Image (tube, rainbow, N blue to C red):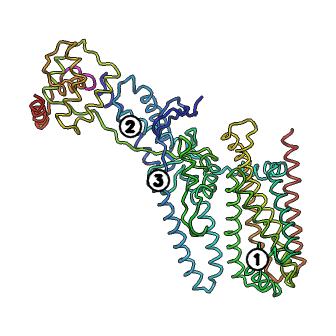
Amino acid sequence: MKVAQLLERRKVRWSELEAMCRELENGRSRRLGAVGVLRFASAYRSACADLALADAYQLPPHTVQYLHDLVGRAHNQLYRSRLFQWQTWAHEMFRRVPTMILFDRAAWLAFVIFWGIFFASMALAYSSREFSLEVIGEEAMETYQRNFSQPIGGRSFEDSSMMGGFYVYNNASIGLQCFAAGLLLGVGGLFITVSNALQLGAVFGFIFTTPSRGNFIEFVTAHGPFELTAIVLSAGAGMRLGFAIVDTNGLSRMASLRKAVDRAMPTAAAAVVLFFLAAVIEGFLSPSDAPYAVKAGVAMLSTAILVFYIVVLGLRGRIVDAD
Amino acid sequence: MSGMPQPPRQLDSRIEIVTPENIAFHYVVAGPFRRLPAYIIDCLICTTVLVGSLIGISFAFGSAGLFAIGFGIWLLIAFAVSWFYFGLFETFWNGQTPGKRMMGLRVLSVTGQPINAMQAILRNILRAVDAMPVLGSVAIGIPLYMVALLAAAANSRYQRLGDLAAGTMVVVERRSKLRGLSQLSHPDVVRLALDLPRSLAVNRGMAQALSLYVARRDRIAPARRFEIARTLSEPLAERFGLPRDINPDLMLCALYYRTFIADTAGGAVLSPESEAAEMAAAEASVR
Protein backbone atom coordinates (compact mmCIF):
# COMPACT_ATOMS: atom_id res chain seq x y z
CA MET A 1 0.00 0.00 0.00
CA LYS A 2 1.29 3.43 -0.83
CA VAL A 3 1.76 6.05 1.86
CA ALA A 4 -0.86 8.23 0.23
CA GLN A 5 -3.57 5.58 0.63
CA LEU A 6 -2.38 4.71 4.13
CA LEU A 7 -2.55 8.36 5.18
CA GLU A 8 -6.03 8.68 3.70
CA ARG A 9 -7.23 5.76 5.83
CA ARG A 10 -5.48 6.73 9.04
CA LYS A 11 -6.34 10.40 8.85
CA VAL A 12 -9.92 9.73 9.93
CA ARG A 13 -8.78 7.98 13.10
CA TRP A 14 -6.21 10.60 13.91
CA SER A 15 -8.48 13.55 13.47
CA GLU A 16 -11.08 11.81 15.61
CA LEU A 17 -8.50 11.44 18.38
CA GLU A 18 -7.41 15.03 17.89
CA ALA A 19 -11.00 16.24 18.20
CA MET A 20 -11.51 14.26 21.41
CA CYS A 21 -8.25 15.65 22.84
CA ARG A 22 -9.35 19.17 22.03
CA GLU A 23 -12.67 18.63 23.73
CA LEU A 24 -11.02 17.23 26.86
CA GLU A 25 -8.40 19.97 26.95
CA ASN A 26 -10.95 22.72 26.74
CA GLY A 27 -12.53 21.22 29.81
CA ARG A 28 -16.06 21.35 28.45
CA SER A 29 -16.51 17.67 29.14
CA ARG A 30 -14.18 15.98 31.56
CA ARG A 31 -16.02 12.75 30.89
CA LEU A 32 -16.54 11.20 27.52
CA GLY A 33 -19.07 8.60 28.56
CA ALA A 34 -18.57 4.86 28.24
CA VAL A 35 -18.65 4.76 24.45
CA GLY A 36 -16.41 7.80 24.20
CA VAL A 37 -13.85 6.27 26.53
CA LEU A 38 -13.74 3.10 24.47
CA ARG A 39 -13.34 5.06 21.26
CA PHE A 40 -10.72 7.33 22.78
CA ALA A 41 -8.70 4.39 24.06
CA SER A 42 -8.83 2.53 20.80
CA ALA A 43 -8.01 5.62 18.74
CA TYR A 44 -5.11 6.31 21.11
CA ARG A 45 -3.82 2.76 20.80
CA SER A 46 -4.01 2.82 17.04
CA ALA A 47 -2.19 6.16 16.93
CA CYS A 48 0.46 4.58 19.15
CA ALA A 49 0.73 1.63 16.81
CA ASP A 50 1.01 3.93 13.79
CA LEU A 51 3.78 5.86 15.53
CA ALA A 52 5.62 2.66 16.35
CA LEU A 53 5.42 1.56 12.73
CA ALA A 54 6.02 5.02 11.27
CA ASP A 55 9.48 4.08 10.12
CA ALA A 56 8.35 0.88 8.51
CA TYR A 57 5.51 2.69 6.74
CA GLN A 58 8.03 5.30 5.55
CA LEU A 59 5.82 8.11 6.76
CA PRO A 60 7.19 11.54 5.95
CA PRO A 61 9.01 13.26 8.85
CA HIS A 62 6.39 15.95 9.39
CA THR A 63 3.72 13.28 9.73
CA VAL A 64 5.88 11.48 12.29
CA GLN A 65 6.24 14.77 14.16
CA TYR A 66 2.48 15.18 14.07
CA LEU A 67 2.07 11.69 15.51
CA HIS A 68 4.55 12.38 18.31
CA ASP A 69 2.58 15.47 19.27
CA LEU A 70 -0.78 13.74 18.95
CA VAL A 71 0.25 10.75 21.06
CA GLY A 72 1.75 13.13 23.64
CA ARG A 73 -1.49 15.07 23.88
CA ALA A 74 -3.64 11.99 24.12
CA HIS A 75 -1.29 10.48 26.68
CA ASN A 76 -1.76 13.54 28.88
CA GLN A 77 -5.53 13.21 28.67
CA LEU A 78 -5.56 9.47 29.28
CA TYR A 79 -3.27 9.58 32.30
CA ARG A 80 -4.61 12.48 34.33
CA SER A 81 -3.29 14.02 37.52
CA ARG A 82 -4.39 12.30 40.65
CA LEU A 83 -6.29 14.60 42.97
CA PHE A 84 -6.16 14.66 46.73
CA GLN A 85 -6.79 11.21 48.08
CA TRP A 86 -8.37 12.08 51.38
CA GLN A 87 -8.22 8.61 52.86
CA THR A 88 -4.53 8.36 52.16
CA TRP A 89 -4.04 11.81 53.62
CA ALA A 90 -5.93 10.92 56.77
CA HIS A 91 -3.74 7.87 57.16
CA GLU A 92 -0.70 10.06 56.57
CA MET A 93 -1.73 12.72 59.05
CA PHE A 94 -2.68 10.44 61.93
CA ARG A 95 -0.33 7.50 61.44
CA ARG A 96 2.79 8.33 59.54
CA VAL A 97 3.33 12.02 60.34
CA PRO A 98 3.42 11.63 64.14
CA THR A 99 5.85 8.73 63.82
CA MET A 100 8.01 10.64 61.40
CA ILE A 101 8.11 13.70 63.63
CA LEU A 102 8.86 11.67 66.74
CA PHE A 103 11.71 9.73 65.16
CA ASP A 104 13.01 12.41 62.83
CA ARG A 105 16.44 13.70 63.75
CA ALA A 106 15.95 16.85 61.69
CA ALA A 107 12.80 17.74 63.65
CA TRP A 108 14.60 17.19 66.95
CA LEU A 109 17.56 19.20 65.74
CA ALA A 110 15.23 22.07 64.85
CA PHE A 111 13.57 21.67 68.25
CA VAL A 112 16.84 21.76 70.17
CA ILE A 113 18.28 24.63 68.15
CA PHE A 114 15.12 26.71 68.39
CA TRP A 115 14.57 26.29 72.10
CA GLY A 116 18.26 26.37 73.00
CA ILE A 117 18.80 29.68 71.27
CA PHE A 118 15.43 30.98 72.44
CA PHE A 119 16.30 30.51 76.10
CA ALA A 120 19.87 31.67 75.68
CA SER A 121 18.70 34.82 73.95
CA MET A 122 16.02 35.34 76.57
CA ALA A 123 18.58 35.11 79.39
CA LEU A 124 20.93 37.50 77.61
CA ALA A 125 18.21 40.05 76.90
CA TYR A 126 16.97 39.81 80.47
CA SER A 127 20.41 40.48 81.90
CA SER A 128 21.72 43.02 79.43
CA ARG A 129 19.90 45.90 77.80
CA GLU A 130 22.75 46.18 75.30
CA PHE A 131 21.82 42.78 73.87
CA SER A 132 18.17 43.77 73.45
CA LEU A 133 19.20 46.99 71.74
CA GLU A 134 21.41 45.00 69.39
CA VAL A 135 18.85 42.34 68.50
CA ILE A 136 15.48 44.07 68.70
CA GLY A 137 16.39 47.71 68.19
CA GLU A 138 15.29 50.65 70.28
CA GLU A 139 12.24 51.58 68.25
CA ALA A 140 10.77 48.08 68.33
CA MET A 141 11.52 47.83 72.06
CA GLU A 142 9.48 50.94 72.79
CA THR A 143 6.63 49.68 70.60
CA TYR A 144 6.50 46.37 72.45
CA GLN A 145 6.56 48.09 75.80
CA ARG A 146 3.80 50.50 74.79
CA ASN A 147 1.60 47.79 73.25
CA PHE A 148 1.56 45.75 76.40
CA SER A 149 1.40 48.59 78.89
CA GLN A 150 -2.41 48.49 79.03
CA PRO A 151 -4.31 45.51 80.43
CA ILE A 152 -5.47 43.13 77.75
CA GLY A 153 -9.07 43.00 76.73
CA GLY A 154 -11.69 44.76 74.75
CA ARG A 155 -10.68 44.26 71.17
CA SER A 156 -13.72 44.29 68.96
CA PHE A 157 -14.82 41.24 66.97
CA GLU A 158 -14.01 43.05 63.75
CA ASP A 159 -10.44 43.79 64.80
CA SER A 160 -10.05 40.22 65.99
CA SER A 161 -11.08 38.84 62.61
CA MET A 162 -8.71 41.17 60.85
CA MET A 163 -5.83 40.20 63.08
CA GLY A 164 -6.72 36.51 62.70
CA GLY A 165 -6.42 36.88 58.94
CA PHE A 166 -3.18 38.75 59.37
CA TYR A 167 -1.69 36.06 61.60
CA VAL A 168 -2.55 33.32 59.11
CA TYR A 169 -1.07 35.32 56.26
CA ASN A 170 2.03 36.41 58.09
CA ASN A 171 2.90 33.44 60.29
CA ALA A 172 2.01 30.65 57.89
CA SER A 173 3.95 32.48 55.17
CA ILE A 174 6.99 32.67 57.43
CA GLY A 175 6.59 28.98 58.21
CA LEU A 176 6.38 27.99 54.55
CA GLN A 177 9.35 30.20 53.69
CA CYS A 178 11.28 28.54 56.48
CA PHE A 179 10.35 25.15 55.00
CA ALA A 180 11.34 26.16 51.47
CA ALA A 181 14.61 27.69 52.63
CA GLY A 182 15.55 24.34 54.15
CA LEU A 183 16.12 23.08 50.63
CA LEU A 184 19.31 25.16 50.46
CA LEU A 185 21.31 22.28 51.97
CA GLY A 186 19.58 22.88 55.32
CA VAL A 187 21.59 26.05 55.87
CA GLY A 188 18.76 28.38 54.81
CA GLY A 189 16.32 26.77 57.24
CA LEU A 190 18.94 26.78 59.96
CA PHE A 191 19.53 30.49 59.43
CA ILE A 192 15.84 31.41 59.61
CA THR A 193 15.30 29.21 62.66
CA VAL A 194 18.24 30.74 64.49
CA SER A 195 17.18 34.28 63.65
CA ASN A 196 13.57 33.60 64.67
CA ALA A 197 14.68 32.09 67.97
CA LEU A 198 17.06 34.97 68.66
CA GLN A 199 14.38 37.58 67.98
CA LEU A 200 11.61 35.89 69.94
CA GLY A 201 13.88 35.04 72.86
CA ALA A 202 15.17 38.61 73.04
CA VAL A 203 11.62 40.03 73.03
CA PHE A 204 10.62 37.72 75.87
CA GLY A 205 13.76 38.53 77.86
CA PHE A 206 13.37 42.25 77.32
CA ILE A 207 9.69 42.39 78.22
CA PHE A 208 10.41 40.57 81.48
CA THR A 209 12.58 43.52 82.55
CA THR A 210 9.67 45.94 82.07
CA PRO A 211 6.42 46.40 83.97
CA SER A 212 4.50 45.20 80.89
CA ARG A 213 5.46 41.56 81.54
CA GLY A 214 2.15 40.56 83.10
CA ASN A 215 0.11 41.70 80.11
CA PHE A 216 2.60 40.19 77.69
CA ILE A 217 2.46 36.76 79.30
CA GLU A 218 -1.31 36.91 79.34
CA PHE A 219 -1.29 37.64 75.62
CA VAL A 220 1.13 34.96 74.44
CA THR A 221 0.05 32.06 76.65
CA ALA A 222 -2.92 30.76 74.70
CA HIS A 223 -1.50 30.52 71.20
CA GLY A 224 2.12 29.89 72.14
CA PRO A 225 2.17 26.07 72.09
CA PHE A 226 0.67 25.72 68.60
CA GLU A 227 2.60 28.55 67.03
CA LEU A 228 6.03 27.71 68.37
CA THR A 229 5.58 24.02 67.58
CA ALA A 230 4.53 24.92 64.04
CA ILE A 231 7.69 27.00 63.55
CA VAL A 232 9.85 24.15 64.78
CA LEU A 233 8.01 21.60 62.61
CA SER A 234 8.25 23.57 59.39
CA ALA A 235 11.91 24.33 59.98
CA GLY A 236 12.56 20.65 60.71
CA ALA A 237 10.73 19.54 57.58
CA GLY A 238 12.74 21.97 55.46
CA MET A 239 16.00 20.83 56.99
CA ARG A 240 15.06 17.24 56.28
CA LEU A 241 15.06 18.17 52.58
CA GLY A 242 18.36 20.01 52.77
CA PHE A 243 20.19 17.38 54.79
CA ALA A 244 18.95 14.62 52.47
CA ILE A 245 20.97 16.23 49.68
CA VAL A 246 24.10 16.21 51.84
CA ASP A 247 23.75 12.90 53.66
CA THR A 248 22.38 10.57 51.02
CA ASN A 249 22.61 7.31 52.91
CA GLY A 250 24.02 5.55 49.88
CA LEU A 251 21.38 6.76 47.44
CA SER A 252 21.98 9.19 44.63
CA ARG A 253 21.39 12.78 45.69
CA MET A 254 18.19 13.04 43.68
CA ALA A 255 16.78 9.76 44.99
CA SER A 256 17.65 10.78 48.53
CA LEU A 257 15.88 14.13 48.06
CA ARG A 258 12.75 12.44 46.67
CA LYS A 259 12.65 10.10 49.62
CA ALA A 260 12.96 13.03 52.01
CA VAL A 261 10.14 14.88 50.20
CA ASP A 262 7.86 11.99 50.94
CA ARG A 263 8.53 12.48 54.64
CA ALA A 264 8.81 16.25 54.75
CA MET A 265 5.66 17.24 52.86
CA PRO A 266 3.09 15.83 55.31
CA THR A 267 5.05 17.37 58.19
CA ALA A 268 4.91 20.76 56.50
CA ALA A 269 1.17 20.28 55.97
CA ALA A 270 0.77 19.55 59.68
CA ALA A 271 2.69 22.75 60.43
CA VAL A 272 0.34 24.78 58.24
CA VAL A 273 -2.66 23.35 60.11
CA LEU A 274 -1.05 24.32 63.41
CA PHE A 275 -0.39 27.84 62.10
CA PHE A 276 -4.07 28.16 61.28
CA LEU A 277 -5.16 26.99 64.74
CA ALA A 278 -2.63 29.31 66.36
CA ALA A 279 -3.82 32.25 64.27
CA VAL A 280 -7.44 31.71 65.25
CA ILE A 281 -6.51 31.60 68.93
CA GLU A 282 -4.14 34.55 68.58
CA GLY A 283 -6.74 36.60 66.76
CA PHE A 284 -9.73 35.93 68.98
CA LEU A 285 -8.84 34.48 72.37
CA SER A 286 -5.45 36.00 73.20
CA PRO A 287 -6.49 39.67 72.98
CA SER A 288 -9.92 39.09 74.55
CA ASP A 289 -10.81 39.93 78.12
CA ALA A 290 -11.42 36.29 79.03
CA PRO A 291 -10.00 35.41 82.46
CA TYR A 292 -6.41 34.24 82.47
CA ALA A 293 -7.51 30.82 83.66
CA VAL A 294 -9.28 30.22 80.34
CA LYS A 295 -6.22 31.23 78.34
CA ALA A 296 -3.97 29.06 80.47
CA GLY A 297 -6.46 26.23 80.08
CA VAL A 298 -6.34 26.53 76.30
CA ALA A 299 -2.56 26.51 76.43
CA MET A 300 -2.55 23.37 78.53
CA LEU A 301 -5.14 21.70 76.36
CA SER A 302 -3.23 22.47 73.17
CA THR A 303 0.00 21.24 74.72
CA ALA A 304 -1.76 18.04 75.71
CA ILE A 305 -3.07 17.64 72.15
CA LEU A 306 0.40 18.13 70.73
CA VAL A 307 1.95 15.63 73.12
CA PHE A 308 -0.80 13.14 72.34
CA TYR A 309 -0.38 13.70 68.61
CA ILE A 310 3.37 13.46 68.44
CA VAL A 311 4.24 11.07 71.26
CA VAL A 312 1.22 8.78 71.66
CA LEU A 313 0.19 8.55 68.00
CA GLY A 314 3.86 8.50 67.04
CA LEU A 315 4.67 5.52 69.24
CA ARG A 316 1.50 3.76 68.16
CA GLY A 317 2.37 4.31 64.50
CA ARG A 318 5.79 2.83 65.19
CA ILE A 319 4.21 -0.26 66.75
CA VAL A 320 1.70 -0.64 63.90
CA ASP A 321 4.52 -0.32 61.39
CA ALA A 322 6.54 -2.96 63.16
CA ASP A 323 3.72 -5.51 62.96
CA MET B 1 10.55 -1.04 32.01
CA SER B 2 7.62 1.08 31.03
CA GLY B 3 7.39 4.69 32.02
CA MET B 4 11.11 5.11 32.39
CA PRO B 5 12.84 8.01 30.71
CA GLN B 6 15.80 7.30 28.48
CA PRO B 7 19.25 8.22 29.76
CA PRO B 8 20.02 11.78 28.74
CA ARG B 9 21.49 11.46 25.28
CA GLN B 10 19.75 14.31 23.61
CA LEU B 11 21.45 17.18 21.90
CA ASP B 12 18.39 19.43 21.83
CA SER B 13 15.61 19.81 24.35
CA ARG B 14 13.67 16.74 23.27
CA ILE B 15 13.18 13.91 25.69
CA GLU B 16 11.82 10.48 25.02
CA ILE B 17 9.00 8.97 27.04
CA VAL B 18 8.12 5.29 26.91
CA THR B 19 4.43 4.80 27.64
CA PRO B 20 2.80 1.72 29.21
CA GLU B 21 1.71 0.91 25.66
CA ASN B 22 5.44 0.50 24.98
CA ILE B 23 5.56 3.39 22.55
CA ALA B 24 8.35 5.89 22.67
CA PHE B 25 7.32 9.42 21.86
CA HIS B 26 9.04 12.75 22.16
CA TYR B 27 8.37 15.82 24.23
CA VAL B 28 10.10 19.14 24.04
CA VAL B 29 11.08 20.33 27.51
CA ALA B 30 10.24 23.96 28.15
CA GLY B 31 13.19 26.16 28.97
CA PRO B 32 13.16 29.27 31.17
CA PHE B 33 12.19 31.60 28.38
CA ARG B 34 9.15 29.62 27.35
CA ARG B 35 8.06 29.49 30.97
CA LEU B 36 8.55 33.17 31.70
CA PRO B 37 5.54 34.41 29.64
CA ALA B 38 3.31 31.81 31.29
CA TYR B 39 4.56 32.92 34.69
CA ILE B 40 3.92 36.57 33.90
CA ILE B 41 0.35 35.78 32.79
CA ASP B 42 -0.24 33.87 36.03
CA CYS B 43 1.19 36.74 38.08
CA LEU B 44 -1.12 39.19 36.32
CA ILE B 45 -4.10 36.93 37.07
CA CYS B 46 -3.08 36.65 40.74
CA THR B 47 -2.66 40.41 41.04
CA THR B 48 -6.01 41.03 39.37
CA VAL B 49 -7.75 38.58 41.72
CA LEU B 50 -6.11 40.12 44.79
CA VAL B 51 -6.81 43.72 43.84
CA GLY B 52 -10.32 42.89 42.59
CA SER B 53 -11.23 40.99 45.74
CA LEU B 54 -9.84 43.76 47.92
CA ILE B 55 -11.99 46.32 46.13
CA GLY B 56 -15.03 44.04 46.19
CA ILE B 57 -14.62 43.24 49.87
CA SER B 58 -14.03 46.89 50.76
CA PHE B 59 -17.32 47.83 49.16
CA ALA B 60 -19.29 44.87 50.53
CA PHE B 61 -17.99 45.00 54.10
CA GLY B 62 -17.16 48.69 54.18
CA SER B 63 -20.73 49.68 53.40
CA ALA B 64 -21.85 47.59 56.38
CA GLY B 65 -19.19 49.25 58.52
CA LEU B 66 -17.34 45.98 59.00
CA PHE B 67 -14.23 46.74 56.99
CA ALA B 68 -11.91 45.07 59.49
CA ILE B 69 -13.66 41.69 59.14
CA GLY B 70 -13.49 42.01 55.38
CA PHE B 71 -9.81 42.80 55.52
CA GLY B 72 -9.20 39.75 57.68
CA ILE B 73 -10.98 37.59 55.11
CA TRP B 74 -9.00 39.23 52.33
CA LEU B 75 -5.74 38.37 54.11
CA LEU B 76 -6.85 34.72 54.15
CA ILE B 77 -7.54 34.94 50.41
CA ALA B 78 -4.16 36.57 49.86
CA PHE B 79 -2.46 33.75 51.73
CA ALA B 80 -4.28 31.09 49.73
CA VAL B 81 -3.64 32.78 46.38
CA SER B 82 0.01 33.54 46.97
CA TRP B 83 0.93 30.05 48.17
CA PHE B 84 -1.57 27.75 46.49
CA TYR B 85 -2.72 29.35 43.20
CA PHE B 86 -0.19 27.44 41.13
CA GLY B 87 -0.38 24.23 43.11
CA LEU B 88 -4.16 23.92 43.06
CA PHE B 89 -4.48 24.76 39.38
CA GLU B 90 -1.81 22.24 38.49
CA THR B 91 -3.64 19.65 40.57
CA PHE B 92 -7.10 20.18 39.14
CA TRP B 93 -6.16 21.23 35.61
CA ASN B 94 -3.94 18.24 34.99
CA GLY B 95 -0.61 20.02 35.34
CA GLN B 96 -1.59 23.39 33.91
CA THR B 97 -2.20 26.88 35.25
CA PRO B 98 -4.09 29.42 33.14
CA GLY B 99 -0.76 30.86 31.98
CA LYS B 100 0.63 27.45 31.11
CA ARG B 101 -2.53 26.56 29.25
CA MET B 102 -2.29 29.72 27.17
CA MET B 103 1.34 29.06 26.35
CA GLY B 104 0.78 25.36 25.70
CA LEU B 105 2.89 24.11 28.60
CA ARG B 106 2.19 21.28 31.01
CA VAL B 107 3.83 19.92 34.14
CA LEU B 108 4.55 16.19 34.08
CA SER B 109 6.48 13.80 36.26
CA VAL B 110 9.93 13.08 34.92
CA THR B 111 8.62 9.63 34.01
CA GLY B 112 6.06 11.23 31.68
CA GLN B 113 3.16 10.39 33.97
CA PRO B 114 0.83 13.08 35.27
CA ILE B 115 1.69 14.78 38.54
CA ASN B 116 -0.28 14.26 41.73
CA ALA B 117 -1.53 16.83 44.20
CA MET B 118 1.51 16.55 46.45
CA GLN B 119 3.96 17.15 43.61
CA ALA B 120 1.94 20.12 42.38
CA ILE B 121 1.80 21.78 45.80
CA LEU B 122 5.41 21.02 46.70
CA ARG B 123 6.96 22.36 43.51
CA ASN B 124 5.10 25.60 44.01
CA ILE B 125 5.84 26.06 47.71
CA LEU B 126 9.52 25.59 46.90
CA ARG B 127 9.07 28.41 44.38
CA ALA B 128 9.94 30.64 47.36
CA VAL B 129 13.52 29.38 47.12
CA ASP B 130 13.66 29.38 43.32
CA ALA B 131 12.46 32.98 43.22
CA MET B 132 15.45 34.21 45.22
CA PRO B 133 16.73 36.84 45.27
CA VAL B 134 13.68 39.09 45.55
CA LEU B 135 14.09 42.79 44.82
CA GLY B 136 12.20 44.94 47.26
CA SER B 137 10.11 43.63 50.12
CA VAL B 138 8.86 40.08 50.37
CA ALA B 139 5.22 41.10 50.07
CA ILE B 140 5.55 43.27 46.97
CA GLY B 141 8.85 42.44 45.37
CA ILE B 142 10.19 41.45 41.99
CA PRO B 143 11.49 37.90 42.11
CA LEU B 144 14.63 37.46 40.03
CA TYR B 145 14.54 33.62 39.94
CA MET B 146 18.34 33.39 39.86
CA VAL B 147 18.34 30.17 41.86
CA ALA B 148 15.87 28.64 39.40
CA LEU B 149 17.95 29.75 36.42
CA LEU B 150 21.11 28.25 37.89
CA ALA B 151 19.36 24.99 38.71
CA ALA B 152 17.74 24.81 35.26
CA ALA B 153 21.08 25.43 33.58
CA ALA B 154 22.60 22.53 35.48
CA ASN B 155 20.32 19.75 34.28
CA SER B 156 19.07 18.55 30.96
CA ARG B 157 15.36 18.96 31.69
CA TYR B 158 15.53 22.62 32.75
CA GLN B 159 14.16 21.70 36.17
CA ARG B 160 14.22 24.34 38.87
CA LEU B 161 14.76 23.29 42.48
CA GLY B 162 11.03 22.76 43.07
CA ASP B 163 10.90 20.52 40.01
CA LEU B 164 13.91 18.55 41.18
CA ALA B 165 12.43 17.97 44.62
CA ALA B 166 8.99 17.03 43.29
CA GLY B 167 10.34 15.00 40.38
CA THR B 168 8.53 17.06 37.76
CA MET B 169 9.35 18.82 34.50
CA VAL B 170 7.56 21.27 32.24
CA VAL B 171 6.97 20.18 28.66
CA VAL B 172 5.69 21.95 25.59
CA GLU B 173 2.47 20.41 24.37
CA ARG B 174 2.69 21.05 20.68
CA ARG B 175 -0.36 20.93 18.52
CA SER B 176 0.90 20.49 15.03
CA LYS B 177 -1.55 20.21 12.19
CA LEU B 178 -1.57 17.10 10.09
CA ARG B 179 -0.21 18.06 6.72
CA GLY B 180 -0.86 15.57 4.00
CA LEU B 181 1.61 14.62 1.33
CA SER B 182 2.80 17.30 -1.00
CA GLN B 183 0.61 17.57 -4.06
CA LEU B 184 2.67 16.83 -7.11
CA SER B 185 0.50 16.36 -10.12
CA HIS B 186 2.44 18.17 -12.77
CA PRO B 187 2.26 16.04 -15.94
CA ASP B 188 6.06 16.00 -16.31
CA VAL B 189 6.42 14.57 -12.82
CA VAL B 190 3.84 11.89 -13.45
CA ARG B 191 5.35 11.02 -16.81
CA LEU B 192 8.88 10.76 -15.46
CA ALA B 193 7.63 8.69 -12.50
CA LEU B 194 6.37 6.15 -15.01
CA ASP B 195 9.61 6.22 -16.98
CA LEU B 196 11.90 5.66 -14.00
CA PRO B 197 13.38 2.15 -14.06
CA ARG B 198 11.72 -0.47 -11.83
CA SER B 199 15.10 -1.36 -10.39
CA LEU B 200 15.41 2.05 -8.79
CA ALA B 201 14.53 1.09 -5.23
CA VAL B 202 14.04 3.73 -2.59
CA ASN B 203 15.32 2.76 0.82
CA ARG B 204 14.26 4.27 4.13
CA GLY B 205 16.94 6.93 4.28
CA MET B 206 16.26 8.08 0.77
CA ALA B 207 12.53 8.17 1.36
CA GLN B 208 13.13 10.49 4.31
CA ALA B 209 15.40 12.72 2.28
CA LEU B 210 12.84 12.85 -0.51
CA SER B 211 9.94 13.82 1.68
CA LEU B 212 12.00 16.45 3.51
CA TYR B 213 13.08 17.90 0.19
CA VAL B 214 9.63 17.95 -1.37
CA ALA B 215 7.99 19.37 1.76
CA ARG B 216 10.37 22.30 1.69
CA ARG B 217 10.97 22.91 -1.97
CA ASP B 218 8.16 25.46 -2.15
CA ARG B 219 10.20 27.74 0.01
CA ILE B 220 13.43 27.36 -1.92
CA ALA B 221 14.33 29.43 -4.95
CA PRO B 222 14.46 27.42 -8.20
CA ALA B 223 18.21 27.80 -8.68
CA ARG B 224 18.84 26.62 -5.15
CA ARG B 225 16.54 23.64 -5.71
CA PHE B 226 18.70 22.54 -8.56
CA GLU B 227 21.82 22.84 -6.48
CA ILE B 228 20.36 20.77 -3.65
CA ALA B 229 18.62 18.16 -5.77
CA ARG B 230 21.71 17.57 -7.88
CA THR B 231 23.63 15.86 -5.09
CA LEU B 232 21.12 13.04 -5.14
CA SER B 233 19.93 13.05 -8.74
CA GLU B 234 23.31 12.94 -10.48
CA PRO B 235 24.63 9.72 -8.95
CA LEU B 236 21.22 8.11 -9.48
CA ALA B 237 21.06 9.20 -13.13
CA GLU B 238 24.53 7.84 -13.67
CA ARG B 239 23.80 4.48 -12.10
CA PHE B 240 20.51 3.90 -13.88
CA GLY B 241 21.57 5.28 -17.21
CA LEU B 242 19.14 8.16 -17.33
CA PRO B 243 19.93 11.15 -19.50
CA ARG B 244 22.51 13.35 -17.83
CA ASP B 245 20.68 16.59 -18.54
CA ILE B 246 17.57 15.50 -16.66
CA ASN B 247 16.09 18.20 -14.44
CA PRO B 248 17.28 17.26 -10.89
CA ASP B 249 14.28 18.84 -9.20
CA LEU B 250 11.91 17.07 -11.54
CA MET B 251 13.64 13.79 -10.94
CA LEU B 252 13.37 13.96 -7.15
CA CYS B 253 9.70 14.95 -7.44
CA ALA B 254 9.08 11.97 -9.71
CA LEU B 255 10.81 9.66 -7.26
CA TYR B 256 8.72 11.10 -4.47
CA TYR B 257 5.58 10.63 -6.51
CA ARG B 258 6.42 7.02 -7.16
CA THR B 259 7.41 6.26 -3.59
CA PHE B 260 4.62 7.96 -1.70
CA ILE B 261 1.69 8.64 -3.98
CA ALA B 262 1.18 6.11 -6.74
CA ASP B 263 2.97 3.50 -8.77
CA THR B 264 1.02 4.16 -11.88
CA ALA B 265 -0.19 7.48 -13.04
CA GLY B 266 -3.87 7.86 -12.45
CA GLY B 267 -4.00 10.43 -15.14
CA ALA B 268 -5.85 12.93 -13.01
CA VAL B 269 -3.69 15.92 -13.68
CA LEU B 270 -4.26 19.24 -12.03
CA SER B 271 -1.31 21.17 -13.21
CA PRO B 272 -0.54 24.50 -11.65
CA GLU B 273 0.94 26.48 -14.46
CA SER B 274 3.26 28.32 -12.15
CA GLU B 275 5.13 25.13 -11.33
CA ALA B 276 5.94 24.48 -14.96
CA ALA B 277 7.06 28.06 -15.41
CA GLU B 278 9.25 27.84 -12.35
CA MET B 279 10.92 24.69 -13.55
CA ALA B 280 11.65 26.20 -16.93
CA ALA B 281 13.09 29.28 -15.30
CA ALA B 282 15.26 27.18 -13.06
CA GLU B 283 16.52 25.16 -15.98
CA ALA B 284 17.40 28.35 -17.81
CA SER B 285 19.22 29.82 -14.86
CA VAL B 286 21.39 26.75 -14.39
CA ARG B 287 22.48 26.47 -17.98
- Segment colored magenta: B258-264
From the image, tell me which residue sits under label 2: A66
State whether residue A128 appears in this view: yes
**The N terminus of chain A - image quarter:** top left
Q: Chain of mark 1?
A: A
Query: Front-most of A285 and B137?
Result: B137
Sequence-earlier tag: 1 or 2: 2
Q: Which residue is mark 3?
A: B101
Residue occupying the point 19% across, 29% down: B226
- Amino acid type indicated by mark 3: Arg
- Is A254 left or right of A263, judged from the image as shown? left
State which quarter of the image contains the C terminus of chain A: top right
Q: CA distance from mark 3 to mark 1?
A: 41 Å
Queried whether the magenta region covers residue B260, the answer comes back as yes
Give the labeled residue for mark 1.
A284
Three-letter residue code for mark 2: Tyr
Helix, strand or loop at label 2? It is: helix
